[in-house]
Image (cartoon, rainbow, N blue to C red):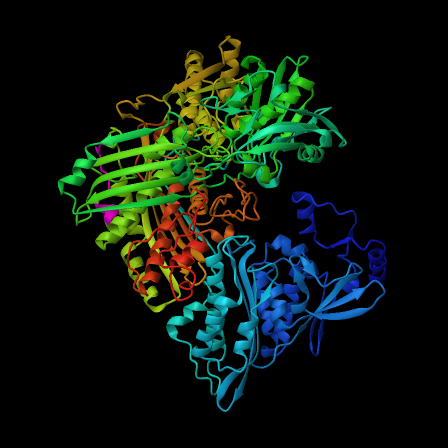
Amino acid sequence: MNLQNLLDLKSRYPDAKLVVGNTEIGIEMRLKRIQYQVIISVGYVSDLNILAVHDDGIEIGAAIRLTELQTFLKKVIEKRPFHETSSCKALIEQLKWFAGKQIRNVASVGGNICTASPISDLNPLWMSAGAKFRIIDCKGGIRSKMAKDFFLGYRKVNLASTEILLSIHLPWTRQFEFIKEFKQAHRREDDIAIVNAGMRVFLEENNGRWFVADASIVYGGVGPVSLSALRTETFLIGKGWDKDLLQGALRILEEDIVLKENAPGGMVEFRRSLMLSFFFKFHQWICQQMNGKESFSEMLDGSNLSAIRSFKESFCIGTQNYEIIKHGSSVGSPEVHLSSRLQVTGEAEYVDDIPLPPNCLHAALVLSKKPHARIISIDDGGAKSLPGFAGLFLAKDVPGGNDIGPVIHDEELFASQFVTCVGQVIGVVVSDTHENAKLAAEKVHIEYEELPAVISIHDAIRANSFHPNTERCLKKGDVEQCFKSGVCDKIIEGEVCVGGQEHFYLEPNCSLVWTMDGGHEVHMISSTQAPQKHQKYISHVLGVPMSKVVCKTKRIGGGFGGKETRSAFIAAAAAVPCYLLNRPVKITLDRDVDMMISGQRHSFLGKYKVGFTNEGKLLALDLEIYNNAGNSLDLSLAVLERAMFHSDNVYEIPKVKVSGRVCYTNLPSNTAFRGFGGPQGMLIVENWIQHVAVELKKTPEEIREINLQIEGSILHYGQQLQHCTLSRLWDELKSSCEFSKARKDVDLFNLHNRWKKRGLAIVPTKFGISFTSKFMNQAGALVHVYTDGSVLVTHGGVEMGQGLHTKIAQIAASSFCIPLSSVFISETSTDKVPNASPTAASASSDMYGAAVLDACEQIKARMEPIASRQKHTSFAELANACYMERIDLSAHGFYITPDIGFDWTSGKGSVFKYYTFGAAFAEVEIDTLTGDFHTRIADVLLDLGYSLNPAIDVGQIEGAFIQGLGWVALEELKWGDADRKWIRPGHLYTCGPGTYKIPSANDIPIRFNVSLLKGAPNVNAIHSSKAVGEPPFFLASSVFFAIKDAIVAARAVLGHDEWFQLDNPATPERIRMACSDDFTKPFASSYYRPKLSI
């Protein structure tokens, strides 16, 4: 297609959308449900793909891909005089952090311009650089428009329906004309800007001074379009480039572009401070560029150089240090994950990869749009008229019980009269395709009578809104007496808010359900951590016995606790139409729906009172903790209880009182997440440890070290600490990371760098291993030995990427002394191993490994008489000989965790079989002007006994650490509440990767070292190993407290040495606003604390 063809098409279809990479229009159509009747692909129109160098600048075709532009600009810089290419350099730097490489490879320059996003990274640069946009109409007429006049309003540009953007003209910069780019996002890589900017200044010398002849200051992310700071630009003209200019411009900038209190996107104080910070950086950068120029006297202060110094980019380096303790043929060996090759080639099958059975329907959920309301009416007329519609099923259609819940039945499968959160399931639509089902679900019209809603923990406390029978208390000694006795030299009080976290598993919730034998049996394949829960839920809602319901799971694409209970109601919803219509039904949640309805890690509120001596010895702790359960209990009480059990972390506290309550709110029910409340409890502890340190003017590490628990310590729930390696871990880590030297190096760096600060921290952990509900600590397995010597193992655990099947296969291989390749684990199925506990609590390798070993030992005992008669050349030969002797080569193994149990009435017992101990050191560097940070070093040391598979265990540690880093420093959930009126009440704003940011490759520590403690066998688990899934997660808090240490250094510059609260996640907003300085003072006090959705 040539340009004339395109213009003809545009003339015939003036409302047609032009696309190159479809990176914006595709999202609008898929996620925003915007329908465009005509779309024209213009990626290969030659006139739109021009890249030309002219005497007056560069011409860039509108269809040029961003990657092509980057490559072209780099070549231009090499060939043109240095002073001409300032704008080219700025564009290259901005493109470096523009989306991800995959997007840059297909997205076009013109598409980004015409989208007119208020947070476009490039539009502020086009505007400040004086770029002109060439526009052509359908008759071939061409006009030019300055970039600064092209953007008319939110997503509106100066283009008629019969015009298209042809090219961009970027002028060369003049001698002493400088252009600089700025951007701050939640995450450096592949993220949209919070605020960005393009700034230009042209300096001229006059009578020995340098004056501003021209200037352009443009910001994005602070209005409906990229905005020029017009009053600031006017002020700059004719002024000398000096400190007076800086101070005057900053004063005007404060009022030049104003963000209202409830501006969309929130973070108003942060965004306004960024505008000042960016201009300060620009001023300092100009001073650096002009350094050494004749008559330029505004020298850059050495301490201010850090304002413009970029983080030093470096390749990540990792080390893994462990010993190999072999047991038999396979246990202890660092074997590769059995599914890894299939996974990296894309051949591994997940639920969505399974070929659909004939006559299969697709399901979509009808969801509440109100946080609390009475259902007045439901109208399915619009849905029925759509093609492919096969039915809408509501509460009245459920053949069995509509009441569900993993612990108590306090939920409805389909809401019948009231809805209690946005995203609650009201019904399910089935249709012939996934897209048609979603469209039909949206067309179901529901009228509501709205009722008052409780959203946050603070709301719940004020309204006395708690789930019934969920108050808990643990006591050790008389706390009040200790506070009153005068033995405490100091007593502090405070409050800690702990943010939640989205599971963000790669595979969303998905189930395929079908009936068999004329509709009398129900089978399903589900992405779940708990096939037995799916079996139980579906049995209940359909009113059929569990023996007629089979759930199978081959592998899942991540779970992290999110598929322990919350996946079950989704499968149950699909089972209703499947059963009633006697047709297969598949349900797959889109990412935004999955995030909105399936629950997250619980947010917590902790209120503490701590007494201690002047030396830092802890004496008493009185702690109240609350978690936000949402609209049903789910596992929230157990999550609260584990948080309470971990409310000492690793510290000896003579007197303890911990009380807890589970808050009822009108949010989707929160649920299990890696750590199950333990990390939240420990994070509260480490916050008040920091508070103690500040009060005593000591380092947190000093407080931690003198209060470490030791062998024989009696914990606040009556359990005695045994086989404790805490002191050894602490000492070895301090030595290996050279903590004293690191502290001196950081202090020296901070002394010489005003606007970049480094911080460090060492944080220990102690994580209890066992389900806290005693009955769940049981496991079953089934082992078959075949006559060719191969072994088939089935057990109740689910492979979700953590390597469980690999470890189990190693245990079986070592038991029979056969190669690992001779053992196969196909799937987890409720008709093979019944009544299995969820794959959770880090205990699966312990329990299912022991159950498999039990089965193997039974078979070996039967084989032994045959084996003792004569020597067999192979295991296959022995197996065949046993078969010929009619020996049973199949066994069911079973295991229960011994010596555990807890009585809440007395508050005493042995909750956990053992503990996994660990510690981590982290060093970070922050930009105090923007809140950006890098993790320079992370050293992790964990006691895993004799590892079953050190390669997999190290991978688990690394993955847990990075996921934990997301929780403490990146991932923030934002709900519509009183503090965020720009979000609809009760709605989750961060319901997709566009707004919710998990760590990227750029967030991996630059130096990442993982070591396993040597020579520390665990007598309480199979083959002396220890559990690994959850314990390392909390160690990422070392990054959080290293960030806080860096902020402490920044605040100290202006004399702020008092205690301050930093909530997690430590996002750029929280880091920057805590680094109180002259650029934040106009908008917030030094005690300002950005609101957190808890």
Is 791 above or below relative to 310?
Answer: above
Magenta span = 703-714
**825 lies left or right of 391:** left
Residue 859: % across, % down: 45, 15
Q: Quadrant of the C terminus?
A: top left
Q: Nearer the viewer, residue 24 or 359?
A: 24
Name, please, the residue furthest toward the top.
Answer: 886
Residue 788: % across, % down: 55, 20
Q: Quadrant of the N terminus?
A: bottom right
**361 lies left or right of 269:** right
Give residue 754's quadrant in the image: bottom left
Viewer can see residue 1040:
yes
Q: Nearer the viewer, residue 882 or 1078?
A: 1078
Residue 288: % across, % down: 47, 76
Q: Nearer the viewer, residue 599 or 1011?
A: 599
Tell me which secondary structure the magenta stretch mostly adopts.
loop
Q: Is residue 815 magenta?
A: no
Q: Is residue 711 magenta?
A: yes
